[in-house]
């Protein structure tokens, strides 16, 4: 049975991010990761995509199919470069890897807005910071108020996160890797669309668009079948 490794992004951990993918356990071995600092683990002082990429790369086993959402997609792109021999495929869902397309105005504006939020946002109010972040990325999630303890923990970690606009994705190295790639977006945000378009061309990668679910395209009812078909074809290849 093929193993699919699922890596979550910011704020919401693995169990919540990949809830809609549970039915895939009938076809694949699913490894739903909780990144360092996310419940049930204790918080970490600093969230850094490079450190998490090293952590993830060490967990990979030969033949894995790696899937990452948002910040987790950035981590997956970096981990895939570290351990290309371990992967059978790579899928990323709206990674905020703005460096790959900074010449596009919507992407530059998105990156600048993120840097401004981290520099000037309400550092003493995790709930307010979280709500501003969710609006910026086009998420429809409306967190409870006041934040429950686990969500407050992840909101505070978000505030200590290294901005993904700093991530330098080694596109040429990834393009030289033999495993198939799939890039997914949700047709809701011009910056994410532009980033995914650039990754599609540069990696090169297959492309899928699942509208109507904001920054959570993996919740679209057609996502699972598309991912399963991609994994099956990658395994056969």
Image (cartoon, rainbow, N blue to C red):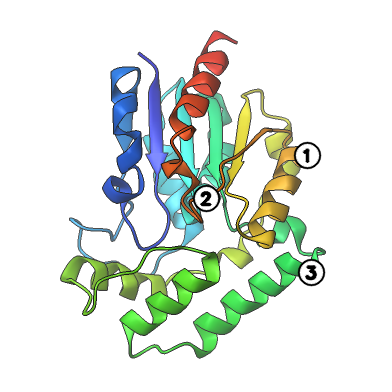
Q: Tell which circle, 1 or 2, labels the residue nearer the N-terminal end.
A: 1
The residue shown at (67%, 28%) is 177
Q: Tell which circle, 3 or 1, labels the residue nearer the N-terminal end.
A: 3
The residue shown at (33%, 52%) is 35
Tag 2, which secondary structure? loop
Name the spot of residue 2 as percent of width and height, x first: 39, 17
Which residue was labeled with disc 3? 105
| Depth check, front residue: 188 or 74 | 188
Q: Tell which circle, 2 or 3, labels the residue nearer the N-terminal end.
A: 3
Left or right of 191, for residue 221: left
Which residue was labeled with disc 1? 201
Q: In which quarter of the image is the N terminus?
A: top left
Left or right of 125, for residue 9: right
Q: In this view, does 115 lie above or below 194?
A: below
Which residue was labeled with disc 2? 212
Between marks 3 and 1 in the image, the one whose residue lies nearer the viewer = 3
């Amino acid at each position: 049975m093929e193993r699919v490794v699922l890596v979550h992004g910011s704020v919401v951990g693995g169990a919540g991010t990949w809830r809609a993918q549970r039915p895939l356990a009938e076809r694949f071995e699913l490894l739903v990761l909780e990144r360092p600092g996310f419940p049930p683990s204790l918080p970490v002082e600093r969230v850094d995509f490079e450190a998490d990429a090293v952590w993830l790369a060490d967990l990979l086993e030969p033949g894995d199919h790696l899937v990452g959402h948002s910040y987790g997609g950035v981590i997956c792109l970096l981990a895939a470069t570290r351990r290309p021999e371990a992967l059978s495929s790579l899928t990323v869902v709206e990674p905020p890897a703005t460096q790959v397309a900074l010449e596009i105005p919507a992407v530059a504006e998105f990156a600048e807005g993120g840097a401004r939020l981290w520099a000037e946002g309400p550092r003493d109010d995790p709930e307010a910071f979280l709500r501003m972040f969710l609006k910026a990325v086009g998420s429809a999630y409306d967190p409870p108020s006041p934040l429950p303890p686990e969500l407050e923990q992840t909101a505070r970690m978000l505030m200590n996160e290294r901005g993904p606009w700093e991530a330098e994705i080694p596109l040429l190295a990834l393009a030289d890797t033999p495993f198939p790639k799939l890039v997914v977006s949700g047709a809701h945000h011009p910056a994410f669309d532009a980033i995914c378009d650039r990754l599609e061309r540069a990696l090169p990668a297959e492309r899928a668009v699942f509208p109507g679910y904001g920054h959570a395209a993996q919740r679209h009812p057609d996502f699972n079948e598309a991912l399963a078909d991609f994994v099956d074809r990658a395994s056969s290849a």
